[in-house]
Image: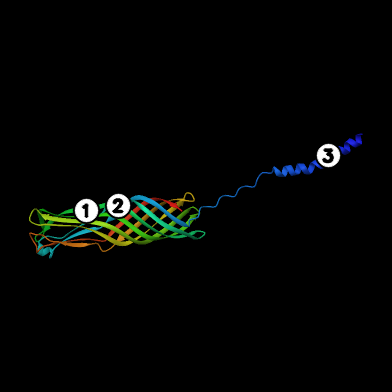
Amino acid sequence: MKESALALIAVVALIGTPALAADMAVKAPPAPVPASAPPGWTGFYVGGDVGGAWTSNTGTWAPLPSPLAFGVFGQSGSNGGSSFVGGLHAGYNWEFAPTWVAGIEGDWSWAAAKGSFSQAWTITPPPGPCPGCFTSMSSHLDWISSLRARFGYLVTPTVMAYATGGVAWGKFDYAANNSNAVTYVTNAAFSSTQTGFAVGGGLEWAMTKNWLVRAEYLYYRFNNGPSVVANSTAFPANPSGYSWSSTNVNVARAGLSYKF
C-alpha cells in the first residue's frame, strides 16, 4: 500500500510540473512598450505672432532753390519710433534629413510705429534764429509683411534653430510742414508702400504633433525713401524739398502655429 501511494504521488508530481511551468510563463511581466516617435516637422502650418517693432529713418528739409537763396539753413532729424506688432503667418516645412528642415513662409503684421521731429529755423547769413519759424517731419509704419525661405537645424527632435530671409513690403505714412509765423507755409502728406528685404532667425519648439511655439527676430530694410517738393502760395520761387532716408525696422516677436 505504501509503495502504491508513493508511486501515485510521483506520477501526479510529474504531470503537474509542466502545467505549473506553463502557468508561470503566462504570468510573466509584459515587455516594455517602446517610446512614441517624436512629431515630424513636414507639413503646412498657420499661426499668429505678437511682439514689438522699432523703426528708424532720417527726415531732411531742403529750402529751395538753395539754402543761400532761401536765406535759411536746411535741417535733418530722426523719425524713429516703436509700437506693438501683431499678425498672422502661414507656411510649409519639409524635413529632408534626420536633423535638417527647409521651408517657406509668408506673414503680415499690423504696426503703429511713429516718429517725428520739429526744429526751429536758423537764418543764413549771418547765422541766427528765426522767431516763429519751424519745420516738422514724421513717418508712420502702418503694416509690414514678408515672403521668406527658412532653413533649420534640429537641436533635438522637437527643437529647431532656424535662419530666414526673403522679400518684404511695408506701408508708411509721411507728413511734413513748415512755417515762418504766417507768411510762408508748406505742407506735404502722402502714403507709400515700399519693397525691401527681411532677414533673421529664431527657435521653434514642437510641443505636440500639431502645436508649435516660436521666438523670432527679424530685421527689415526699405531702401530709397521718398521725396516731395511742396510749394508756398506766398513765395512760389522758394518751395520746400522734403525727403526721407531708407527705413530700418527691427521686430522681436513670439508665435504659435498649428501644423496640419
Indicate the secondary structure of the residue bearing disc 3.
helix
Residue 153's spot in the image, x, y percent? Answer: 47, 58
Nearer the camera: disc 1 or disc 3: 3
Above or below, comparing residue 122 to residue 10 in the picture: below
Along the polypeptide, which appears first: circle 1 or circle 3? 3
Mark 2 or mark 3, which is nearer to you? 3
Residue at 72% over, 42% down: 24
First in sequence: mark 2 vs mark 3: 3
Q: Residue at x 36, y 56 (%)?
A: 107
Is 257 or 139 nearer to us in this picture?
257
Q: Residue furthest top?
A: 1
Tag 1 residue? 116
Gap in Å between the C-alphas at discs 1 and 2?
Answer: 16 Å
Q: Quadrant of the N terminus?
A: top right
Q: Earlier in the sequence, mark 1 or mark 2?
A: 2
What number is the disc on residue 111? Answer: 2
- C-alpha span from label 2 to label 3: 89 Å
Mark 1–mark 3 distance (CA, rounded to whole Å): 103 Å
Q: State the scheme by which the image is colored.
A: rainbow
Classed neighbour count for the residue bearing mark 1: other residues with Cα under 10 Å, few (<14), some (14–19), many (≥20): many
- Residue 46: which numbered mark, if any? none
Residue 106 image position (x, y, % from top left) = 37, 58
| Horizontal side of residue 162 vs 127, given as left or right | right
Q: Residue at x 27, y 57 (%)?
A: 171
Element at label 1 = strand
Seen as rendered, the residue at the extreme front is 260
Label of residue 12 in the image: 3
Are the residues flagged by discs 1 and 2 in contact, CB closer than 8 Å? no
Question: Is 34 left or right of 220, judged from the image as shown?
Answer: right
